[in-house]
Amino acid sequence: MTSLYKTPESKKEILALYQAKLDSLKIDYLEENVNTQFGSSHVIIIGDATKPPLILVHGSNGCAPIALDVYPNLSQHYQVFAVDVIAQPNKSAETRPSMKDTSYGIWMNEVIAALGLNDVTMVGFSLGSFIIWKTLLEDESKIKQAYLIAPVGIVSGNPLRAMLDIFIPMKRFIRTENQADLDRVIDALFSERDDFAAPFLAKVLPNFDLDFTPIPNISKKEAKRISTPLTIMGAEHDVLGPGKKLLRRAEEIFPSLKQTTLLEASKHVQSVGDNQRVENLILSG
C-alpha cells in the first residue's frame, strides 16, 4: 500500500510532533493497538476502568493527543478512549475509508468491539462527529449517547467562502509553504491562535496526502434511523457549517435530538473558553 506520507522522514517528523504533544499533557495513559479490517487502530486510554467508557474522536488533520488536550477533564467522570482516526497523521493505519458509505462507521464499531466496550458515550469534533453519525447508522447498539461538536456532514457552509478562505490558500501552502497562506487558513478556522496547531499543520499539510473528498451531508431518511440521544453544538461563525443553520437542520431531522447549543462568536475550532463550556456540558450529562 502506498503511504499517505510523502517520505519516511516526514512521517518520522510528524509522529515526533505527535509524541511531543502527548508528552506535554503530563498524564498517565495506556496505549493499545486494535485490529480492524481497515488495519491497526491506535487508542490512548486514560482514567479509571471502573468509570463509564467515553470514545473521543478528533477532527481532520489531527490526532488523539490534540483531543485530549482540548477536553482534559473528561477522565474525572469517564474512562476516556481517545482514538487515532485512520488515514490521518497519527499512529493508526493509513487505509482511507470511503466518505460516501458507512465504512467509517464499520471501522469505529470494530474498534469499540475490539476494546470490549458497551454503553459508550461518544464525543467528536468536526470530522470526529461525522464518524460518530456514520457509526450510529452502521450499528448504534453499543452507544449510550453522543455529543457532536461543530460537526461536518449535517449542513454545508458557503462554498465560495470556504474555497477562498481555506482550500485555495491551503493548496497554495502545500505547494509553496508560504507562511501567509497557512496563517490565512488558521485565521479562517480557529477562534484563537493555538501554539501546537500552527507547527503541526505546517508539517502535515505539505507532507501528508490529505483527503479533499467532499463530505456528504446526512439525509433526513438516515437521520430518522438514529435513536441514540444526541447533543449537538454549533459554532456561530463556522465557515464549514454555520452554527444557526446547523442547529436548525438538526432540530428538523434528528428525532433523537436531546439538546442543542450555539457557541456564539465561535469559528470552526473553538476557543479555550468554549472548549471548557463544551466539556462542562458533557460532564453534566
Image: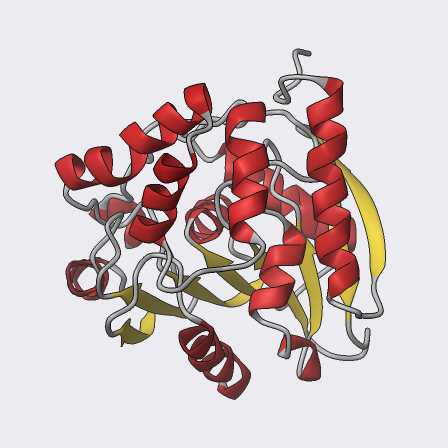
Q: How many marks?
A: 0
Q: Residue at x 60, y 57 (%)?
A: 66
1 displayed left or right of 28: left
Using the image as rendered, state which of residue 212 and residue 120 is in the foreground.
212
Foreground: 197 or 81?
197
Where's residue 67, x and y in %?
59, 60
Q: Is residue 34 left or right of residue 253?
A: right
In this rendering, is residue 43 above or below 232? above
Residue 276 in view: yes
**In front here: 7 or 103?**
7
Residue shown at 60%/45% (left/top)? 108
Residue 112, percent across and down? 68, 52
For image coordinates 59% across by 34% down, the residue present is 203
- On the question of residue 142 being in view, the answer is no
The quarter of the picture where residue 178 lies is: top left
Q: Is residue 121 above or below residue 77?
A: above
Residue 82: image x %, image y %?
67, 57
Can you name the residue that lies furthest to the bottom here?
284
- What residue do we see at 62% from left, 66% from top? 69
Say left or right for 205 vs 248.
right
**In the figure, 219 relative to 103: above or below?**
below
* Residue 285, percent from left and from top: 49, 83
Q: Is residue 273 above or below residue 143?
A: below
Q: How is the image coloured?
A: secondary structure
Quadrant (top left/top right/bottom left/bottom right) for the N terminus: top right
